[in-house]
Image: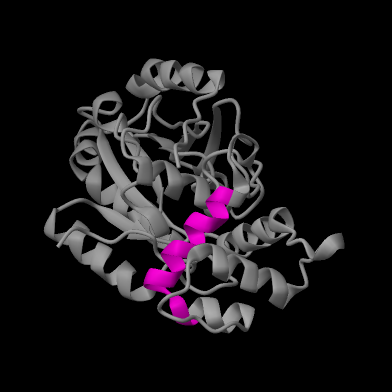
Amino acid sequence: MQIQWYPGHMTKTRRYIEKTLPLTDLVIEVADARIVKSSRNPDFDRLLAGKKRLTVLSKKDLADERINLLWRDYFERAAIPAVFINSTAGQGVSEILPAVRRLLKEDLERAAARGMKKTIRLMICGVPNSGKSTLINALCRRRATDAQDRPGVTRGGQWVTLQSDVELLDTPGILWNKFEDMQAGIHLALTGAVSDEVVDREGLALELIEILMEKYPANLERRYKIHLEPQNSPLEIYEAICRARGFIMRGNEFDYSRCAAVLLDEFRAGRIGRISLEEPDA
């Protein structure tokens, strides 16, 4: 399944990041804990070169806790500053600004030695629907930006005051212009980073079922009250879910479209369980 999505506003966002990056001291890169590899934009290594960076893994409550621990160990071994959060519940959010201050310790000490009180200026960036706006609202403890479970909500950069000496520049979600890794495109679409309007949702639902059959079969059985056999194909399980949920149209035809919408929505909301699509390389 081939997926590509790079609307025009993302080119503008790239230029905006390049233009405003010199105004900032550090970048907070927000990635989705369920798809850590795919949700870290490979273009950021070039765009953000030379700038201090803190990686924030959002939606940790939706990701498999065992895989979260593997990723935590990966970042520690790679000496990459990282914080795992659940912005909705506020878990881990309080760790972010102390981590920022540790990374900027030398800059803050130099300013203090000159008798100056430095204002820390941060930029937040990430792929669409990675949880940036929800995180900003959690940091502000108020609604400072729009936060919706769909890509492309944030369309223009805006400065937000987090503390008396901390300001943050929000930026729209940005992908890269071509997914060389087909699996990355699928994972981004499954988590809602790619607009559903440009995706074959029924094909995407089949991809999800195949992943769940391999990695989380018990979750699939428990959620949809079905029984998996080793010889079952993803299509057979798709149809079993249709029957279990009553997604049958006139003429006894399966309502694949309705079933796909439910599968994707329930996966994204965590109703199928805590599921990670990627884990660190061995």
What colouring method underlies this structural image? one colour
Q: Position of residue 68 (x, y in %)?
A: 33, 68
Judge whether residue 270 is colored magenta: no
Give the overall secondary structure of the magenta segment.
Answer: helix
What residue lies at 43% left-to-right and 50% top-to-bottom? 187
Relative to residue 114, is residue 3 drawn left or right? right
The residue at the point 49 percent across, 80 percent down is: 228
Residue 183 on image: x %, y %: 36, 46
Q: Residue 221 in the image: state x and y as whole percent.
A: 54, 81
The x and y percentages for residue 249 are 83, 61
How many numbered circles does the render carry? 0
**Is 208 located above or below residue 91 in the figure?**
above
Rendered-image quadrant of the C terminus: bottom left
Determine whether, in the image, residue 109 is placed left or right of residue 208: left
Q: Is residue 241 visible?
A: yes
Q: Residue at point 73% right, 57% down?
A: 258
**Relative to the observer, which residue lies in front, 210 or 7?**
210
Q: 182 or 234, which is in the foreground?
A: 234
Taking the view exactly as shown, the residue that stands out farthest to the front is 251
Residue visible at 42% across and 63% down?
Answer: 211
User: Looking at the rendering, in which quadrant would you find the N terminus?
Assistant: top left
Is 211 contained in the magenta span? yes
Task: Examine the rendering and report whether any part of residue 135 can be seen.
Answer: no
Q: Is residue 202 left or right of residue 162?
A: right
Highlighted range, magenta: 203-218
Depicted 27 relative to depicted 88: above or below? above
